[in-house]
Image (tube, helix red, strand yellow):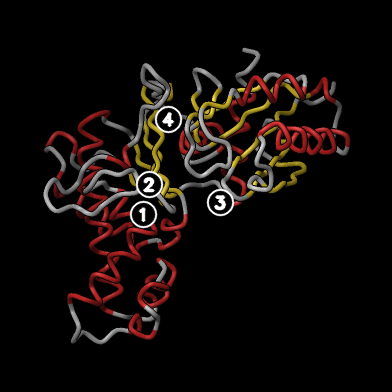
Amino acid sequence: MDKPYVIGIDVGGTNTVVGIVDKRGQILKSGSIKTAKHSQVEDYLDELTGLIEDLIEGTTTKDQIKGIGAGTPNGNYFTGSIEFAPNLPWKGVIPFAQMLEDRAGIPVALTNDANAAAIGEMTYGAARGMKDFIVITLGTGVGSGIVVNGQLVYGHDGFAGELGHVIMRRHNGRLCGCGRTGCLEAYSSATGMARTAREYLELKPDTQTRLRNIPAEDITSKDVFDAAMAGDEMAKEIFRFTGEMLGEAFADFVAFSSPEAIILFGGLSKAGDLIMNPIRESMERNLLPIFKNKVKLMFSELKESDAAVLGASALGWEVRD
């Protein structure tokens, strides 16, 4: 009997990655195109469809593809549209799923990238068998996918789960990319950590640290990680500050949905105990007594380079259900 497959598409601001995936979560073949190359979405979709056809031809037959799942910035699961995505070249509301389905002749489902990561963890990763969990993506921003009773929480409009934009500091908070002040993302994303490093260098001019060897505007979270691993006290303090902020937020998230686990994914999660220990201590310290020592903190089990494609592909199995 022929094997069924799905296609996962990760639409990023720079690149779009496409993979053919089997039931076990193995990516059999993948390829990519440049997202930002096309100012017109129609031209982009024509190139994307060509890539999909090439990948199918080298792997299986079109009738064995059960569906296509796409994870996109500002993707709305209910409408199949990309809505006002700031980091994509096409503005306004793009009926992405329908446009791709018309070209490829395969059913398409779409969601935003953080929700795709949560679906990926539930289907192939650390959340297999769990019905209640939260995935937090720690990258350029802070994203989240919330699963309750085995269902992803979309809200009435498809945009639920913006936990990166809960307000952590009501007064004199940092300006966030969303235009508001004090958001979790402004402190605990990779860019937020780099910002903390610049603040610390200014506030503690007498503290010795190898971070002073880098021009302040060029400091990245990777520089802070490298310094911390080399024993730099200021860098370790920056990780503690970032982790404590996340732990405070997680304690509030637990009060909302009582998850079995909170799963960390993305660049900052590679820091291991440097970030996990302060998160755990801060979360437990701030939890309501009824929740203490009940919530698992875990790292994603998906390989980062594959996770977005796998998460999106998991939507593909549901398209014809």
Q: Give the distance between the C-alpha atoms of the residues marked 3 and 1, in whole angstroms.
A: 16 Å
Mark 3 vs mark 4, foreground winner is 3
Disc 4 element: loop
**Residue type pointed to by label 1:** Ser
**Residue type pointed to by label 4:** Met
Q: Which mark is residue 142?
A: 2
Mark 3 vs mark 1, foreground winner is 1
Q: Give the distance between the C-alpha atoms of the residues marked 1 and 4, in whole angstroms.
A: 26 Å
Q: Which mark is residue 189?
A: 1
| Tag 4 near tag 2, CB within 8 Å | no
Per the image, the residue denoted by label 4 is: 130
Counting from the top left corner in percent of width and height, residue 265 is at 45, 48
The vertical placement of 28 against 161, above or below, is below
Query: Which residue corresponds to the image point at 50% horizontal and 23% vertical from the top-left?
Result: 77
Q: Nearer the viewer, residue 69 or 14?
A: 14
| Tag 2 near tag 1, CB within 8 Å | yes
**Residue type pointed to by label 2:** Val
